[in-house]
Image: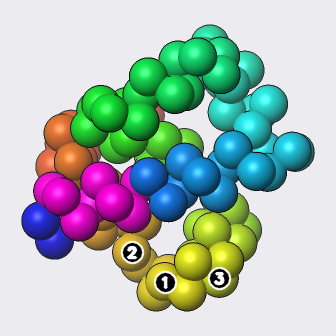
Amino acid sequence: MRQDKAETIALKALGWLATNDELLPVFLGSTGSDIEKLRDGAGDPAFLGGLLDFICMDDQWVIEFCDTEGLAYDTPMRARAALPGGGEMHWT
């Protein structure tokens, strides 16, 4: 997947997250972010990659996002791999 397409998918994920009243506070709390940083992060491919990392932590979140957007369930992971840091393996 090309980075521009991955960024588009991540922006859709950001929009989905922003409308999720239960999950948005979890994301903000776990990242130490706030709404302003969320808006600023929309233009940062590394932030978008981190957002996809967060969503991909839970299969149910992936399913809900993909069902909402009409995407295949592997799309968030493929998009994550195309963004900065996506090729690195984390074993923690």
Indicate the amino acid at tag 1: Leu
The percent position of residue 42, horizontal first and vertical second, equals 41, 36
Q: Is residue 56 magenta?
A: no
The percent position of residue 67, horizontal first and vertical second, equals 65, 82
Neighbour tally class for label 3: few under 14, some 14-19, many 20 plus, Cα within 10 Å: few
Quadrant for the N terminus, please.
bottom left
> Is 83 located above or below residue 26 in the figure?
below
**Location of mark 3 (residue):** 67
**Residue in the foreground of this view, choosing between 25 and 44:** 44
Count of residue discs: 3
Q: Is residue 27 visible?
A: yes
Indicate the amino acid at tag 2: Thr
Indicate the amino acid at tag 3: Asp
**Location of mark 2 (residue):** 75
Q: Quadrant of residue 81?
A: bottom left
Pointer 1 with pointer 2, Cβ within 8 A: yes
Marks 3 and 2 sit apart, C-alpha to C-alpha, by: 11 Å
Q: Main secondary structure of the magenta part?
A: helix
Which element type, helix, strand or loop, lies under badge 3? helix
Q: Is residue 8 magenta?
A: yes
Residue at x 55%, y 27% (from the top left corner): 38
Marks 3 and 1 sit apart, C-alpha to C-alpha, by: 6 Å
Marks 1 and 2 sit apart, C-alpha to C-alpha, by: 6 Å
The percent position of residue 84, horizontal first and vertical second, equals 18, 39
**Magenta span of residues:** 3-10
Neighbour tally class for label 1: few under 14, some 14-19, many 20 plus, Cα within 10 Å: some
Which element type, helix, strand or loop, lies under badge 2? helix
Q: Quadrant of residue 23?
A: top right
> Is 32 located above or below residue 74 in the figure?
above
Residue at x 63%, y 68% (from the top left corner): 65
Pointer 3 with pointer 1, Cβ within 8 A: no
